[in-house]
Image (tube, rainbow, N blue to C red):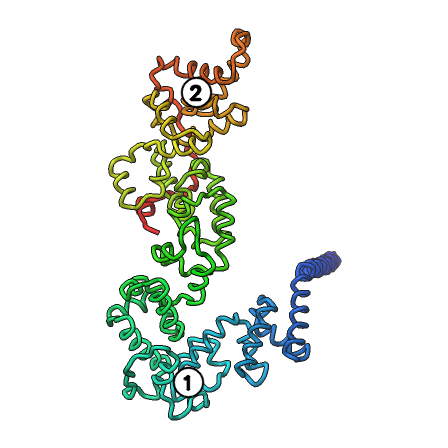
């Protein structure tokens, strides 16, 4: 009996094991099928890339597959970019075989050309792929190694070669005799570059150390391009040596782009381009061909020339960044009322800081929030913190209503002053109530005649207006829209004996932007 039971137990378990193996195998096949389906597009892209490399590099499919497997990055690089970089390799005779340059052709042509220029300025008569990528490693090879590889002649005079590419070389050449051939060619070049800057811009050792700290890759820039930028800044924009050193980031700029900015855009926002660039040197880093798209997106959102004139550094942001930040502002109730504000561009520029401050003020139950407070300097905001975050001055409210109704800020101010509590009305209430009334077909004239109705929360205004509409005794009076708004204010303030204190009854709902608490240090940090 025991034998039969044991036999049955073994048979049953073997069957279960077979069933389990079957299901696992089936599931593995299904997973593989799904994965293969998901990878179809990737596979197709890889096949197309292989075909492209076979045609461009004149290699067979097996080699193309091998190179793509060994260089995963190459799959992501656009074909046009690869073709342009490969043409550059052929032009300068980089690499005798495809295997030598396969790593280089993933670079942008402009990047490769900058690296080529770096070594040509040293006097390299030919170039190899191993010094171009990785570039930093190539720069750290010794002079002896460059000579052993026949990239530099045995009697090379590096200082003479470097200064020969300049239109205005320094009158003297730094002595490099103390260096050994075991020193890197980058060491040789750095000494020459420092010598040039000491002569051309009167740099001190301390200033050079600071420059290198600020721009870590500075010593790898082409000395010819540095000269072109300095010439352009001095001759075209009349920058002094002191100003160039102060804006030292400009040494990495592109002289051709600066000239294009000056010639293509004679005026921006109704102002001459030249004074605008002199006052805001950071704009010299903006690619000239990207400016039209940025101006277009600002114009689309109603940004005026006067606002752009005050905050031209908005052009430092990409079109995509500007657009995404405008959408984000639109999505935040406390900020969307500022879309017509003259400081809107400042809000776009420092949106992250503004959001941190908004969160902080919400956490501390601050009801009236102004754009000036959100975008002001850390010194001013700290003073407000110390004073208990004083109330808004009403400028945001006046600007918003003036922009949307067409009335002057002065006339709106005179009307609002009749309610002594008007400055205590949260800006978010004014915005919400205004758009609520517009949606209900009230005209700007109706609203301006009863401007105090905007000081109350839209839900309360809606409730009172519905009561007026439904009340039989009120219906018989055939009130005009303007009279209905006047009645609305009357009923709200009647409870407070027309003291204006009805404004204080509504507290804005404090919906935090994030669950993470914002610290004082965060809101005081300069960007």
- The numbered mark at residue 450 is 2
Please say if 459 is above or below 140: above
Question: Badge 1: how crowded within 10 Å, few (<14), some, or many (20+)?
Answer: many
Q: How many marks?
A: 2
> Is residue 395 rendered to the left or right of residue 471?
left
Question: Badge 2: how crowded within 10 Å, few (<14), some, or many (20+)?
Answer: many
SS at circle 1 = loop
Which quadrant holds residue 278?
bottom left
**Quick one: 281 or 511, which is closer to the camera?**
281
Please say if 518 is above or below 146: above
Q: Are marks 2 and 1 in contact (CB under 8 Å)?
A: no
Q: Residue at x 47, y 49 (%)?
A: 322
Percent across and percent down for residue 407 are 43, 29
> Is residue 179 rendered to the left or right of residue 333?
left
Q: Residue at x 42, y 63 (%)?
A: 258
Q: In the rendered structure, which disc, 2 or 1, sits on the residue that comes first in sequence?
A: 1
**Residue for badge 1:** 123
> Is residue 501 rendered to the left or right of residue 448?
left
Quarter of the picture containing the N terminus is: bottom right
In this orientation, does residue 2 appear?
no
Which quadrant holds residue 64?
bottom right
Please say if 504 is above or below 168: above
Percent across and percent down for residue 450 are 43, 20
Q: Residue at x 39, y 71 (%)?
A: 228
């Amino acid at each position: 009996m025991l034998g039969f039971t044991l036999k049955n137990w073994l048979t049953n378990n073997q069957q279960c094991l077979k069933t389990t193996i079957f299901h696992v195998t089936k599931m593995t096949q299904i997973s593989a099928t799904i994965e293969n389906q998901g990878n179809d597009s990737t596979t197709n892209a890889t096949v197309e890339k292989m075909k492209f490399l076979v045609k461009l590099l004149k290699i067979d499919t097996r080699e193309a597959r091998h190179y793509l497997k060994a260089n995963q990055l190459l799959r992501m690089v656009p074909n046009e970019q690869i073709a342009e970089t490969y043409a550059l390799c052929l032009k300068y005779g980089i690499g005798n075989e495809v295997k030598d340059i396969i790593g280089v052709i993933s670079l942008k042509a402009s990047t490769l050309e900058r690296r080529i220029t770096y070594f040509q300025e040293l006097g390299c008569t030919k170039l190899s792929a191993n010094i171009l990528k990785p570039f930093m490693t190539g720069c750290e090879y010794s002079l002896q190694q460059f000579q052993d590889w026949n990239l530099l002649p045995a009697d090379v005079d590096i200082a003479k070669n470097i200064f020969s590419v300049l239109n205005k070389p320094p009158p003297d050449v730094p002595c490099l005799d103390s260096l050994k051939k075991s020193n890197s060619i980058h060491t040789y070049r750095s000494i020459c570059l420092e010598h040039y800057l000491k002569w051309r811009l009167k740099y001190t050792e301390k200033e050079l150390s600071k420059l290198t700290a600020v721009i870590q890759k500075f010593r790898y820039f082409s000395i010819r391009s540095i000269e072109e930028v300095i010439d352009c800044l001095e001759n075209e924009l009349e920058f002094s040596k002191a100003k160039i050193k102060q804006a030292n980031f400009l040494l990495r700029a592109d002289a051709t782009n600066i000239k294009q900015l000056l010639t293509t855009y004679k005026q921006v926002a109704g102002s001459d381009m030249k004074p605008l660039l002199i006052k805001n040197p950071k704009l010299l880093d903006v690619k000239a061909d990207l400016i039209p798209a940025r101006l277009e997106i600002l114009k689309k959102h109603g940004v005026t020339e006067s606002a752009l004139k005050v905050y031209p550094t908005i052009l430092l942001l990409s079109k995509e960044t500007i657009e995404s930040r405008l959408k984000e502002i639109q999505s935040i109730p406390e900020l969307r009322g500022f879309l017509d504000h003259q400081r809107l561009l400042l809000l776009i520029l420092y949106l992250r800081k503004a959001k941190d401050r908004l969160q902080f003020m919400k956490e501390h139950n601050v009801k009236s929030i102004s754009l000036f407070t959100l975008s002001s300097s850390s010194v001013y905001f700290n003073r407000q913190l110390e004073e208990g975050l004083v109330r808004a001055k009403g400028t945001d409210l006046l600007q918003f209503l003036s922009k949307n109704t067409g009335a002057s800020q002065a006339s709106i101010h005179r009307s609002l002053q009749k309610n002594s509590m008007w400055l205590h009305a949260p800006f978010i209430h004014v915005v919400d109530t205004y758009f609520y009334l517009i949606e209900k077909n009230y005209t700007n004239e109706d609203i301006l005649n009863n401007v105090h109705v905007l000081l109350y929360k839209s839900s309360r205004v809606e409730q009172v207006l519905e009561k007026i509409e439904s009340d039989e005794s009120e219906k018989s009076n055939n009130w005009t829209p303007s009279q209905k708004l006047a009645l609305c204010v009357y009923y709200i303030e009647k409870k407070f004996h027309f003291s204006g204190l009805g404004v204080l009854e509504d507290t804005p709902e404090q919906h935090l932007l994030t669950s993470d608490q914002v610290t004082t240090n965060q809101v005081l940090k300069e960007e």
